[in-house]
Amino acid sequence: DTAALISRLETALADLRAGRATGVRHRDRLEFDDPDDLAAFPELEGSWSVSQSSLRNLGDGEIAREDCGNARSLTVRLLAQAEQGAVTIDFRGTTLIIDLAAQRYHLRSGTQRLEDQSFPFVPNILHTLHFAIKPDTGRLRLEINQAEPVFIEPSNPTARVAIQTDGDARIKIEDLHIKRIAERDAGAIPPGAQRQLEEVLGLQAFGKAYKDPASPAIVLPANPTGAPSGIALPFRTSSIGIQRFSLVAGQGTLLLGLCQVDGETIDGKRTTLPLPGPGTGPTHVTVAWPAGQTTYTMTIDQQGSDPQVITAQRPEQASHFVIQVRGHARIPTPPALERP
């Protein structure tokens, strides 16, 4: 029926913006040796041409795509054909503006704008522009050639990647490469890594959750079945809550709550919250269940929003506090119970 069709279309659109498979997936590695490479940018303004293994603009214009909600880096190699006009590159809401005539650039995101930087964008010399989002902090790093990197805190990340030319700037793009968070997190669980959660840290594991062998972090990767990945901390009557912990590089839905856990079965109401997406700041969570009370509180603090304090009923048979993600995220340091 119409309602079901609309629901499927909305889901497909959300998947496309997040970079998940929808039956249409634009190529992420482009060397522009095939005219069809231009089809990777469905939004096209002005005249563009693929020739001699490069993408060239034939006047002011823009190429853009909206399927990069889980992109963690963008590398573009381009050259300017003259010292005129400007080039703008948008990577998930962070914008680099290059003034070719003035040989300067600046970086901005939301209301943040870094100071202008001088840089010799010499014509007909290939320049490498690399944007990367640091998974543990959400900060974005920009590197131009081998110069010192510039950092900015992204605000309101998007799924957009775009390149725009103005003022009769003429450029050649030699290649463009997008890397996604899913590429790193979608692999098999390292041997013994899930067992470490249970035997070393004393946590119950759900789905694909595992202990990162190279750091203290707990990885909550996307589960191909669609079921959430997560952990559960044993509830102790001698505790009064859970110390503040964080989730980074998260995307999808966060589920939190005191529940009764029996193996893979979870009985109890969980609070559902959206994760702001990779490239944003961490999501901080603090939980308190004071002795003698029939309720408990969860304080959720996300960048750009006022802290949320959520009060929920404390189940009589609660055995664990459950932390799950339907999507993917990392917990840099294992959560710990708060003692009086």
Image (spheres, rainbow, N blue to C red):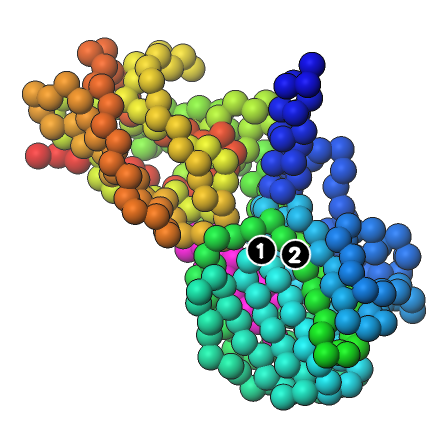
Instruction: Examine the rendered structure and indicate whether residue 187 appears above or below residue 215.
Output: above
Where residue 279 sits in the image (x, y, percent)? 49, 53
Considering the image in quadrants, where does the N terminus appear?
top right
- Range of the magenta residues? 130-144
Q: CA distance from mark 1 to mark 2?
A: 6 Å
Image quadrant assignment for residue 310:
top left
Q: Name which residue lies at 53% across and 71% down.
A: 107
Image quadrant assignment for residue 60:
bottom right
Where residue 261 sits in the image (x, y, percent)? 33, 15
* Left or right: 286 in relation to 61: left
Residue 254 sits inside the magenta stretch: no
Mark 1 element type: loop
- Name the amino acid type tagged 1: Arg
Q: Which SS type dominates the magenta stretch?
A: strand
Q: Quick check: marks 1 and 2 in contact, CB under 8 Å? A: yes
Where residue 258 sits in the image (x, y, percent)? 28, 22
Label 2 Cα neighbours within 10 Å, binned few <14 / some 14-19 / many ≥20: many
- Name the amino acid type tagged 2: Val
Q: Name which residue lies at 76% across and 38% down.
A: 24
* Left or right: 143 in relation to 30: left
Q: Which label sits on residue 161?
A: 2
Q: Name which residue lies at 84% across and 54% down.
A: 37
Mark 2 element type: strand
